[in-house]
Amino acid sequence: MKKILITGASGFIGSFLVEAALSKDWQVWAGIRASSSKEYLQDERIRFIDLNYADKEKLKAQVSQHISQHGAWDYVIHNAGVTKCANPDDFDRINYLYSKHLTEALQESNAIPQKFVLMSTLGAHCSDTLTRYGNSKLKAEKFLKSQTGFPYIILCPTGVYGPREKDYYLVLKMLQSGWDVSVGFEPQVLSFVYVKDLAKAAMLALESDVKNKLYFVSDGREYSDKEYTNLIKTALRKKRTVKLKIPLCIVYTASVLSEIVAKLRNKSSTLNRDKYKIMKQRNWSCDISPITEDLGFSPDYFLKQGLEESVEWYRNNGWL
């Protein structure tokens, strides 16, 4: 039986990665904080571990102890990270330094897995609108690429959506309430990947013979912002909405003010300068032919089907 460690397992993407690994009858170790919710980790087969990424020596000791008691992990998916922070320095600390510590702890404990998958982001490769989040992920990518004898795959998904997701969900809520709000006056080219397809890509990466490569992940299609909105309205069965376009300059001002208020309250803000850069970027397309050719990846969901399944889940669980 293969053993796998999935960090950030309690989050949106992480919980689906756990489900995909369980479907293969692997021994699944969910790396979560003791304070994290286990709402979507109820399967009795899941084993839990709380790793101290902040202190590399303590992390090494944890890894060594785990090996002595349970054996080494065959696979590792490092999915833990943050997309918004009250303190901007936390992006580098959590997304880059913690990734570095985990990689080094595995190496120095003689616990190098057969394959290590790093969950990064398409945003790490948008140099003209590089966010603080994207830059921290890019640093983690560069560190991983500098290692020798360490078999990794880096996955860079575009917009990940699906059941349990909370940011794109706000767009659904807004449209359901009757408001069709867009930012900027130039059309946007968008791309998406359904969370189950991203988990599928991760499993393919782990089981393939390919190593030390980076792949973009999407459903392979491009969508205009208008098409995206119309598909949501169709899934919601919402016929009439009020259209409102907001100039980018207003959004930028609002994002700065929102960040200031959040910082005073020592909280992260959904609307921030990183989010502004994402909304400002007009082209979010990517090429998935390499992952299709190398790993045999093909999406099971395009945006229409994924939105329909997501809306059904949100309704069944009282979110809509």
Image: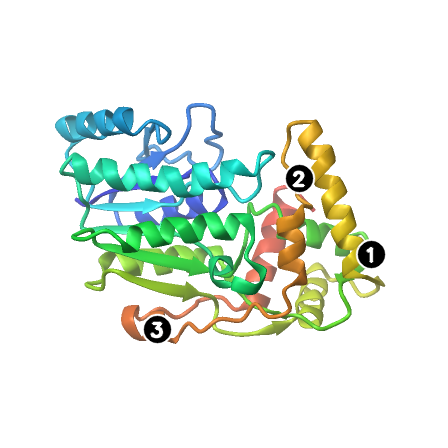
**Vertical arrangement, residue 119 with respect to residue 44, above or below:** below
Which disc is residue 142 wearing? none
Q: Could you tell which of marks 1 and 2 lies nearer the N-terminus? A: 1
Callout in the foreground (1, 2): 2
Badge 3: few (under 14), some or many (20 or more) residues near its Cα, within 10 Å? some
Identify the residue position indicated by label 1 in the image: 178
Residue 290, numbered circle: 3
Q: Residue 74 versus residue 1: which sits nearer the camera?
A: 74
Residue type highlighted by circle 3 = Pro
Q: Of label 1 and label 3, which has the lower sequence position?
A: 1
Residue type beneath disc 2: Ser
Q: Position of residue 28 (x, y in %)?
A: 29, 39
Q: CA distance from mark 1 to mark 2?
A: 24 Å
Q: Quadrant of residue 98?
A: top left
How are the residues colored? rainbow
User: Could you say where residue 259 lies in the image, as x and y percent from the top left?
Assistant: 69, 39
What label sits on residue 269 in the rendered view? 2
